Amino acid sequence: MWLMLQQPEPDDYVIATGESHSVREFLDVAASHCGLDWRKHVKTDPRYFRPTEVDVLCGTPARLARGLAGLRK
């Protein structure tokens, strides 16, 4: 983050791992750390589904790595 703030011009960066994980996977891990069953606390409402949703989204940190590589010491 510090390197992003040192850029001469502001820019948008995607901070990502390059790995794709579902919300369900996130809930499984987070709830297990709390000793909870997330299914007892989460409701799904189809009204909020997006009809044109893509099946898989995965961020790549490549641009971030390229853009900040020159500032690393």
Image (cartoon, grey):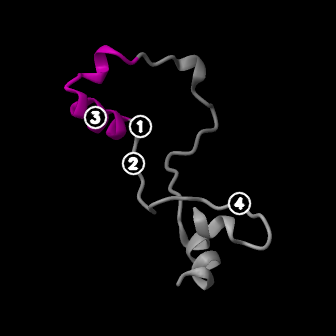
Tell me which amino acid carries mark 2.
His
| Residue bearing the label numbered 2 | 21
Percent across and percent down for residue 38 are 30, 23
> Viewer-nearest of labels 4 and 1?
4
- Between the residue at mark 2 and the residue at mark 1, the CA separation in whole angstroms equals 7 Å
Q: Is residue 36 left or right of residue 49?
A: left
Foreground residue, 71 or 46? 71
Which badge, 4 or 2, comes first in the chain's sequence?
A: 4
Question: Tags 4 and 3 in contact by the CB under 8 Å rule?
Answer: no
Residue 39 drawn at (x, y percent): 30, 20
Within the image, what quadrant is residue 71 found in?
A: bottom right
Q: Quadrant of residue 5?
A: bottom right
* 39 in the magenta segment: yes
Q: Is residue 11 left or right of residue 73?
A: right
Name the residue beneath numbered marker 1. 23
- The mark closer to the camera, 4 or 3, is 4
Q: CA distance from mark 3 to mark 2?
A: 11 Å
Q: Give the mark, 3 or 1, whose residue is nearer the N terminus.
A: 1
- Within 10 angstroms of label 1, few (less than 14), some, or many (20 or more) residues? few
Read off the residue under disc 4: 12
Crowding at mark 2 (Cα within 10 Å: few <14, some 14-19, many 20+): few
